[in-house]
Amino acid sequence: MNIVMDAFGGDNAPLEVIKGAVDAHRDFGVDITLVGDEKKIKDCAAKNSLDISALKIRHADTVIEICEEPTEVIKGKKDCSMAVGMQLLAEGEGDAFVSAGSTGALVVGATFIVKRIKGIKRPALATILPTAGKPTMLLDSGANADCRPEMLVQFGIMGSAYMNKILGVDKPRVALANIGAEESKGRELELETYKQLKTAPVNFVGNIEARQLPLGDCDVCVADGFCGNLMLKLYEGMGKFFSGELKSIFKSSAKSKLAAVMVMKDINNFKKKVDYSEYGGAPLLGTAKPVIKAHGSSDAKAFYNAVRQAKQFTETGVIDTITDALAQMKKVQE
């Protein structure tokens, strides 16, 4: 298996990408191809005493910046590290692609270079969220601001397949993000989506309010990309808020510092539970081959886990499961 990595995507590239790739190659036994300026990659590795002799490098002249138009990845910047990496994936020279670069450019590139699964309207970013119980998948978390009901139904199908195959959830509970639990709540989008999800090949459990997400009341939460991204960013912000408050409490006095020492193991377990780097990134579901969007601020640990996730994505046949579910749904509609 060969995992293609955008060596210049993200705030900490290329150093953290290289470090994560070296560790992932060693522990997961996969080939890794770093895409980007070959000289800069080699110079960075040498400067930091990293042995990259086991990794492959594919040269790419440029990098697509966050501030640039996403469509540049298929127009003026076809030679950027992200575009070249996805082209390798599309041409069969890689089994999965990982990048921490521009989300918009990644979605455009994956749609037009890697292509979509037949029948899928739009790929969706699927983010794993920590909860009081097992993790929950939120999708779409930012790829598609405007959606139609059939797109949200497909998000539910794709999220259900991923949670079952990757995280081992039996009959994942699929819920629709809404402003109330009642079937009559929501905009026209939610009302029609609710009707279609009831007959879709998923374990649909109805509407869910945002406050129920942290409690783990569903395994897959479906939303349009606008609402999904708002929910995700609030989730991330509250995580930082609680982390900061907890740190302040345990540093406030000698007594609290002593208490912190006594519960440090539990604190570390909690930090691990809410650490995004443990998952590595968000899969872009709906593409013909596995694509993983790592967080822009990813460190070596996050890239390491992104490779692990890409490997699992490839091995478990999630894309085949999604394809079968779409075929099943088509038969029901006919």
Image (spheres, grey):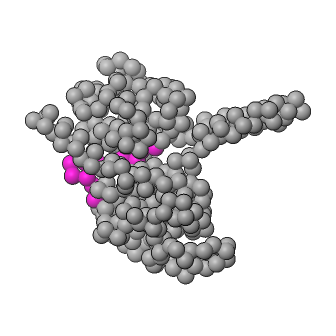
| Image coords of residue 159 (percent x, y) | 36, 40
Q: Residue at x 56, y 47 (%)?
A: 278
User: How many numbered circles are shown?
Assistant: 0
Residue 90 higher or lower than 156, as above or below: below
Q: Residue at x 49, y 28 (%)?
A: 216
Residue 328 vs residue 175, the one in the foreground: 328
Residue 294 vs residue 103, the one in the foreground: 294
| Image coords of residue 325 (percent x, y) | 24, 40
Provide the major secondary structure of the magenta segment: loop
Q: Residue at x 48, y 41 (%)?
A: 128
Say if the magenta span includes residue 32. no
- Whether residue 62 is visible, yes or no, is no
Residue 227 vs residue 119, the one in the foreground: 119
Q: Quadrant of the C terminus?
A: top left
Per the rendered image, the range of residues in magenta is 115-127
Q: Residue at x 72, y 37 (%)?
A: 265
Say if the magenta span includes residue 122. yes
Displayed quadrant of residue 199: top left
Residue 9 higher or lower than 142, as above or below: below
106 relative to 247 in the view: left or right: left
Residue 195 higher or lower than 10, as above or below: above
